[in-house]
Amino acid sequence: MSQYQFGVIGGGNMAEAILRGVIRGNFLEHNSIVVSEPVMDRRRHIGMTLNISAVDDNAVAARCPRILLAIKPQKMGEVLAGISSAVGADATVISIAAGISAAFIDKALGHRGRIVRVMPNTPMLVGAGMSAMAAGPRATAEDMAFVQRLFGVCGRVTQVEESQIDAVTAVSGSGPAYFFYMTEAMIEAGIAEGLDSDTARLLAIETCLGAGKMLSECGEDPSVLRARVTSPNGTTQRAIETMDAAKVKQSMVTAIRAAAQRSRELAGG
């Protein structure tokens, strides 16, 4: 039996964000966690900044009763093959890899452990993540409650069917990039209209932050809030008409559906 209670395989940014939340929220004790990470600099960083054991042997983490797979989809098959004999029959195995089905993980592990898939996003790094979890083979209510608490220390969590995870990946998993892309455009436009870069950045970021807060707290549909700020024949109406003429909304829908398709492609190998 492992001396650790929670093993993390992969010590990248998402794993670090989760661990920071876990520690900040006093959800798990430092000495109950072990991280397996092949890059020495990352192991040192995790060990020094989080006061968590960091090793280069995946099997050490895989022997824990609860395991988080925080690795790239392209590496999943190789990693699972290497840890299958170490994973306990009663382990809870949590994966945050896009496009890798619970059935694939279950088969690769020889049908050992109980599988849960989670799709988080990068705002977890600042405690404002949005994660969706889906029960896989043999996952229990206790497993799901643990995952809810684990990711809840880094933001909000909802439960979906696994068949919906590709859509979740496209909307919220990749979603921060769409937001950043739009913010880039707002900053560039402000500079083009004569603002200095610092002012353009401040205006764009704080406007997006405030608009998101309104959406979250007002409980009204985005279209309603948009209509309220769009005065007839005003500046906002001109901007919206220009975006409609350029089919911006249609392009966004197409792009997000393309992301969902890519997630399905990853699942198919």
Image (cartoon, grey):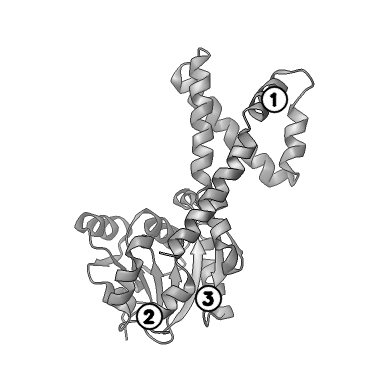
User: Secondary structure under badge 3?
Assistant: loop
Between 36 and 260, the one lying in front of the other is 260
Q: Quadrant of the N terminus?
A: bottom left
Q: Please report whichever mark, 1 or 2, sits nearer to the chain's N-terminal start.
A: 2
User: Secondary structure under badge 2?
Assistant: loop
Q: Which residue is mark 3?
A: 136
On residue 57, the disc is none
Task: Name which residue lies at 57% across and 57% down.
Answer: 168
Q: Name which quarter of the figure residue 236 lies in.
A: top right
Q: Badge 2: few (under 14), some or many (20 or more) residues near its Cα, within 10 Å?
A: many
Residue type beneath disc 3: Gly
Tell me, yes or no, if residue 57 can be seen here: yes
Residue type beneath disc 2: Leu
How far, Cα to Cα, is label 1 from label 3?
A: 45 Å
Task: Name which residue lies at 48% across and 54% down.
Answer: 262
Q: Which residue is mark 1?
A: 241
Q: Name which quarter of the figure residue 267 lies in.
A: bottom left
Residue 89 percent across, percent down from the top left? 41, 87
Q: Name which quarter of the figure residue 130 lies in.
A: bottom right
On residue 109, the disc is 2
Between 226 and 64, the one lying in front of the other is 226
Nearer the observer: mark 1 or 3; the answer is 1
